[in-house]
Amino acid sequence: MSNKNFQLIDGTFAKKDALFILSSFFNEKIAYHNRELLAMKEKNDINTGPIEDKLASLHQTRTQMADYLLSFRDDTKFTLFGSINISTILET
């Protein structure tokens, strides 16, 4: 198995910019799963529960994140740090 880690974000941002960056990430993830869900429904696939659960979780987390950031004064700065770890999966 192979692993590789990539830096996504590492910086300090104003409140509105931090909210925009993080909301954009969540919005893209939500859009991806919405497209996946639509494709499944078009194929009459009834096993949409896991994707619907993932969407609900993403919506809830996005709301919690936004509420957290919005609870601070407008002149607050935030440090955002995040990376993604990619691992290969060996198929049998």
Image (cartoon, rainbow, N blue to C red):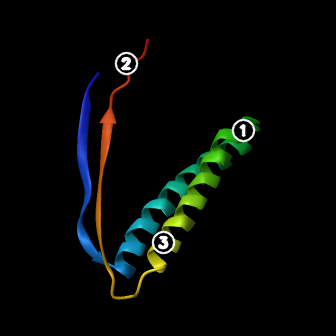
- Of the numbered discs 2 and 3, the one sitting upstream in the chain is 3
Residue under the image location 72 percent in, 44 percent down: 42
Q: Quarter-wise, where is residue 79 in the image? A: bottom left
Question: In the picture shown, does residue 85 fall above or below 63?
Answer: above
**Residue 11 coordinates in the image, percent (x, y):** 22, 67
Name the secondary structure under disc 1. loop
Q: How much space separates mark 1 and mark 3, taking CA atoms?
A: 39 Å
Q: Which residue is mark 3?
A: 68
Question: Label 2: few (<14), some or many (≥20) within 10 Å?
Answer: few
Q: Quadrant of the N terminus?
A: top left
Question: In the picture shown, does residue 68 fall above or below 10?
Answer: below
Residue under the image location 32 percent in, 37 percent down: 86
**Do residues under tags 2 and 3 come within 8 Å of each other at their CB atoms?**
no
Q: Quadrant of the C terminus?
A: top left
Question: In the picture shown, does residue 68 fall above or below 61?
Answer: below
7 left or right of 72?
Answer: left
Question: Label 1: few (<14), some or many (≥20) within 10 Å?
Answer: few
Q: Which residue is mark 2?
A: 90
Q: How much space separates mark 2 and mark 3, taking CA atoms?
A: 39 Å
The amino acid pointed to by label 3 is: Tyr
Q: How much space separates mark 2 and mark 1, taking CA atoms?
A: 28 Å
- Of the numbered discs 1 and 3, the one sitting upstream in the chain is 1
Name the secondary structure under disc 2. loop
Residue under the image location 33 percent in, 82 percent down: 76
Q: Quarter-wise, where is residue 22 in the image? A: bottom left
Q: Which residue is mark 1?
A: 43
